[in-house]
């Protein structure tokens, strides 16, 4: 009544034969429990100057740089998701295969893709399941959600993100049901991914089930700066010969170079080194980022 019919709290109280204070309490309870969620849609702007600089300093086909205006990180991520959703929706066409990864930046992107029916589109999960406590960032859920936006079919990758050892990883990857999905994922026309940075402050959420401080330290000692497709790479984009990479299940990082359009959505200055490594490795065609990350990338590249 309040949000959809625009009735006042007093009018609702009369209809329900209760007090205005009770109506107010129920409305607040609805927000606290998540029944009602309020989103502020900022008027996001792009930084054309930084976009031109990044295009000149890299092999990117296209770039979008969000002006962050010192908004909170979660709001900035929503803004990048809005830019990414617009870009994705512009290039998705009939009979395409769209590969989807995981993470908060991809979740914000998928949420803001407008319902746009397409013919013959297939959305495929290109990385194993995280097993996180937040289904909103899981590849399985994001695959299904994006498919719903395009009234598309979808394929899940029925494996965990990381397994116990390389032998198990190879056995699983060769299972027909898994192999079929991985093969389809490698044939994607578009791949939508995030870029993970290596650090307790940036990687903890995604990798909390797989990395302890000692393993994090070993990765840093090996030169790791970031990860995509669950594989860690150094600042030159080289895939590292580390145990964790041999135990992860995905379409594999080097496959990204063979996909027509790889869109990476990643921002904040903490990820600048990881993004630069991914750019140097030529894993990305289109970058959606924010001004703080862009400045950091350009500074590091000099």
Image: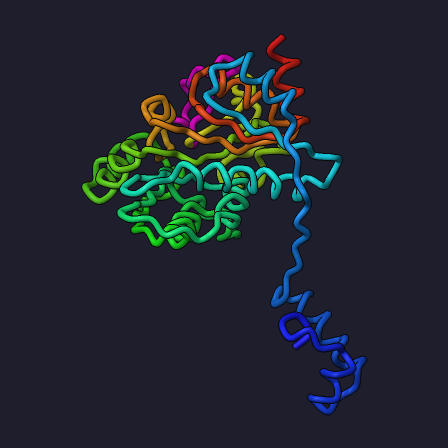
Which region of the structure is painted magenta?
230-245
Which residue is drawn at the image coordinates 30% and 47% (left, top)?
A: 155
The residue located at (55%, 43%) in the rendering is 104
In the image, 147 versus 171, the foreground residue is 147
Instruction: Depth check: give the residue in front, 135 or 171.
Output: 135
- Residue 157: percent from the left, percent from the top? 32, 44
Q: Quadrant of the N terminus?
A: bottom right
Among all residues in the image, which is located at the extreme bottom?
Answer: 17
Drawn side of residue 227 relative to residue 271, left or right? left
Is residue 243 highlighted in magenta?
yes
Please name the residue shown 76% across and 78% down the image. 9
Q: Residue 187, how many percent across, how many down? A: 27, 32
* Drawn side of residue 151 relative to residue 266, left or right: left
Q: Quadrant of the C terminus?
A: top right
Of residue 289 and residue 105, the one placed in the foreground of this image is 289
Place of residue 51 in the rendered image (x, y in percent of width and height, measured from the top left): 59, 22
């Amino acid at each position: 009544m309040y949000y959809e019919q625009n009735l006042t709290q007093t009018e609702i109280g009369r209809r329900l034969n209760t007090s205005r204070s009770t109506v107010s309490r129920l409305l607040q309870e609805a927000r606290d429990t998540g029944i009602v969620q309020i989103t502020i849609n900022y008027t996001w702007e792009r930084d054309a100057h930084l976009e031109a600089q990044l295009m000149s300093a890299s092999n990117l086909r296209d770039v979008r740089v969000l002006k962050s205006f010192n908004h909170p990180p979660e709001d900035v991520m929503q803004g990048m998701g809005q830019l990414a959703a617009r870009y994705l929706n512009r290039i998705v066409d009939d009979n395409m295969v769209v590969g989807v990864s995981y993470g908060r930046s991809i979740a914000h992107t998928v949420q803001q893709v407008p319902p746009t029916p397409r013919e013959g589109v297939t959305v495929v999960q290109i990385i194993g399941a995280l097993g996180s406590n937040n289904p909103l960032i899981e590849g399985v859920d994001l695959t299904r959600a994006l498919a719903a936006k395009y009234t598309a079919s979808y394929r899940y990758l029925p494996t965990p993100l990381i397994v116990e050892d390389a032998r198990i990883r190879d056995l699983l990857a060769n299972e027909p049901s898994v192999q079929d999905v991985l093969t389809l994922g490698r044939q994607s026309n578009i791949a939508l991914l995030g870029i993970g940075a290596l650090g307790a402050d940036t990687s903890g959420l995604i990798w909390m089930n797989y990395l302890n401080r000692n393993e994090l330290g070993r990765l840093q000692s090996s030169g790791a700066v970031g990860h995509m497709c669950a594989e860690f790479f150094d600042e030159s984009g080289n895939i590292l010969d580390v145990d964790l990479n041999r135990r992860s299940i995905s379409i594999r990082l080097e496959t990204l170079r063979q996909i027509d359009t790889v869109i990476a959505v990643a921002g904040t200055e903490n990820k600048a080194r990881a993004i630069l490594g991914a750019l140097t490795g030529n894993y990305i065609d289109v970058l959606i980022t924010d001004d703080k990350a862009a400045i950091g990338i350009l500074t590091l590249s000099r």
